[in-house]
Amino acid sequence: MTSPTDLHPARITMYGAAWCGDCRRSKALLERRGVEYDYVDLEVVVDGAERAKAISGRTNIPVVVFPDGTHFTEPTDAELGAKLDEVAETAA
């Protein structure tokens, strides 16, 4: 199995699905903030759900993995926004 950051280790990776309201909300926040990220569509990527569960230990989505190896499962906009600010400060 690949690690969650194998796609682009310096980027955010989000595991989600089109039918998931929380996924659409988190995706919209990332896009509003102009964040480049990799999206793993659990309806398309064969082992995507398995990978997301291996990261979070749960079946809830979205799972958002950050370059520092931390992750959020079903983050609120406030939680995700604060972490994005932290990531931006670290990158600066």
Image (tube, rainbow, N blue to C red):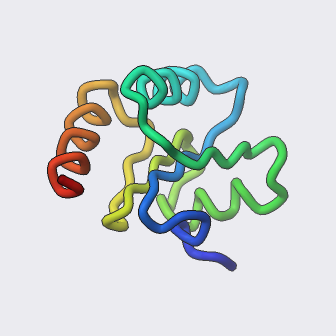
Tally of numbered discs: 0
Q: Residue at x 25, y 50 (%)?
A: 87
Q: Is residue 14 above or below residue 9?
A: above
Left-right relation of 12 to 48: left
**What percent of the width, then of the height, locates residue 5?**
51, 67
Residue 76 occupies quadrant: top left
Relative to the observer, which residue lies in front, 22 or 40? 40
Relative horizontal placement of residue 72, taking residue 22 as reference (left or right): left
User: Percent x, y for residue 74?
Assistant: 44, 37
Q: Position of residue 66 (x, y in %)?
A: 38, 56
In the rendered view, does 32 fall on the left or right side of 88? right
Residue 11 quadrant: bottom left
Residue 7 position (above or below residue 63): below
Q: Is residue 40 left or right of residue 78?
A: right
The quarter of the image holding the N terminus is bottom right
Tell me which residue sits at (54%, 66%) in the image: 4
Q: Residue at x 52, y 52 (%)?
A: 13
Which quadrant of the view contains residue 77?
A: top left
Residue 84 in the image: above or below residue 56: above
Which residue is most to the front?
92
| 11 or 63, nearer to the observer | 11
Residue at 55 percent across and 43 percent down: it is: 60
